[in-house]
Image (spheres, grey):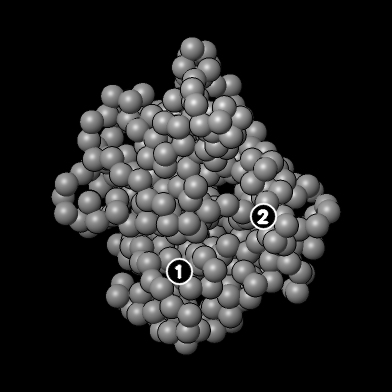
Amino acid sequence: MDTYIRAASQISMQHPLSEEWMDAPILPSAVFNEPIDPDYKQFISPAEARRMGHLLKRAVAVSLDTLQKGECSNPDAIITGTGLGCVENTEKFLNALIDNQEQCLPPTPFMQSTHNTISSQVALKLQCHGYNSTYSHRGTSFDSALLDAIMQFQLHRISTALIGGYDEMTPAYFNMLAKIGYWRDGNVDLASLKTNGMTGSLASGAAVSLLLTDSYSPECLCRIVDTHLFYTHNAEEQNTLIHSFLHQHNLSETDIDAVMCGFSGDEGNDAVYRHLLNSNFPDTTALWYKHLFGESFCASGYGIYTAAVCLKHQKFPEHLIYRSGHHDADFVGNILVINHFQKHDFSLTLLAPCSNSPLL
């Protein structure tokens, strides 16, 4: 059964709710990059905004913007992926717990600290009473939400789904991870992020949303052929599973025009992608996105979003090309998005154009 991405939107360190990053990206030099917030007044009233943390406001705004672009007022399902939920509200509640000696605690930070409050807030704003689910699987949270949506389509339970990936990075959480070497030291540039042997990556939050549908319309960005999640430490098994995934759709590695990988600048993370590319796609163009959107548990959502926009515009901007390879300059065909978390949790998502595709 075909599944299409009808609309997509993002809030990140790039210009929010736009695709300006395709032609005029903001290239960060700092390690910790706060997302650029849009004007929330067009989505949320001031009274509502005062009761919301930063991540909830971003989630509501990016969801409403996606639905507006996709001309859908009430999706059949709202499915969210988040690694840690609203960290800011969790910190507020825990600090109040300590400061007030476990007495007279404010209820709002507690309620907004639960992981599924994001999907709930979006559903309440839309008055959407359909299927609503949240996945919290660390680095594959967004991928799990996407897989659930595709399964719901295949079971003919829904015809539209709003998929979101949301996480935030607070200064306290950033400093905690910095102590274990999770981030780069000092300022960074693109050349250093591509240098082998370096450790640490860029930090940012995540707020990315996709509107999926089971029917084609001219505004659709691309088609989701399939997605697959698997767990393995074995490099050879990873290669076998990639080959099997493509073979299921009568494709070989040479039929892939580009591979979108989560290169972040950290050697432990990037070595896995280099192995998969060299073993399976030695001559294929490799793309990356975390130098524009940062690292977070739901960063893989930006990978799928970026690949979808490339298919929509039928081009690969130079700043997205991590390694040049063979691809048709006049036609962007199949893009395989590969994500891994800590070298063992993997996801494969195959995207294709809505028309003129060898898969049609």
Q: Residue 255 appears at what percent x and percent y?
A: 44, 74
Task: Place residue 217 in its image quadrant.
Answer: top left
Work out how far the residue at label 2 is from the one at label 1, CA to CA, in angstroms: 22 Å
Tell me the SS state at disc 2.
helix
The answer to whether one can see residue 7 in this image is: no
Q: Which mark is residue 177?
A: 2
Which residue sits furthest right? 186
The answer to whether one can see residue 81 in this image is: yes
Q: Amino acid at mark 1?
A: Phe
- Crowding near the residue tagged with mark 1, few <14, some 14–19, many ≥20 C-alpha atoms within 10 Å: many
Q: Residue at x 16, y 46 (%)?
A: 157
Near-viewer residue (123 or 83): 83
Tell me the SS state at disc 1.
strand
In the shown orientation, is residue 165 left or right of residue 151?
right
Please tell me whether residue 101 is drawn above or below residue 324 in the rendered image.
Answer: above
Q: Which residue is mark 1?
A: 346
Quarter of the figure with the C terminus: bottom left
Quarter of the figure with the N terminus: bottom left
Please tell me whether residue 30 is drawn above or below residue 229 in the rendered image.
Answer: above
